[in-house]
Amino acid sequence: MSRRMKEALIGGALLGIVCVVGAYVRSGLTASPIFVFSLWYNRVIMGLAVGAPWKETSRNNALLRGAILGLLVSFAFYSSTGFDDPISFIAGIVYGVILEWWLSRSKN
C-alpha cells in the first residue's frame, strides 16, 4: 500500500470522527449507532477514493478532484438518509478538498 493511500485512509478515518461528533451533537445526542458508523465509514471510503494512485496534476486540479470525489462519495450517504443530512453532504465535499490538500502538501 502506498504512502498516499495510507495517509488518505488515516485522514478519512480521522475526518470521519470529526464528522460523527458533529452529527451526534446536531442530532441532540440521539443519532443511532448505525447512522454514526455509516457516516464514519463513508469518510473512510472517501479516503480510499482520494488516496487512489491518481496521475500527477497541479494542486488546483487535485483540490478540484478532491471536491468532486467528496461530492460523489458523500452523495451515496446523503441519498441513503433520504436527503435528510445536507450538512454532512456539504462537509464531505470539504473533506475531499482537505484530504487532497493534505496529500499534496505532505509530499513537498
Image (cartoon, helix red, strand yellow):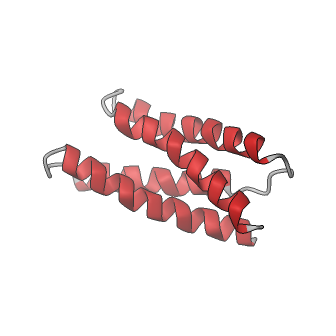
Residue situated in front as seen by the camera: 90 or 81: 90
Judge whether 6 appears above or below 42 on screen: below
Q: Residue pushed farthest right?
A: 56
> Residue 80: x, y in percent?
39, 34
Position in image of residue 94 (x %, y %) = 51, 43
Point 23% across, 51% down: residue: 24
Nearest the eye: 44 or 80: 44
Tally the marks: 0
Position in image of residue 19 (x %, y %): 37, 52
Q: Is residue 62 left or right of residue 27?
A: right
Q: Quadrant of the N terminus?
A: bottom right
Q: Is residue 26 left or right of residue 47?
A: left
The percent coordinates of residue 33 (x first, y second) are 25, 56
The structure residue drawn at horizontal position 76% and vertical position 48%, both measured from the top left corner, is: 59
Tell whether 63 sits left or right of 38: right
In the rendered image, the vertical position of residue 69 relative to residue 37, given as above or below = above
Name the residue at 36% across, 27% down: 83
Residue at 54 percent across and 63 percent down: it is 11
Q: Nearer the viewer, residue 46 or 76?
A: 46
The quadrant the C terminus occupies is bottom right
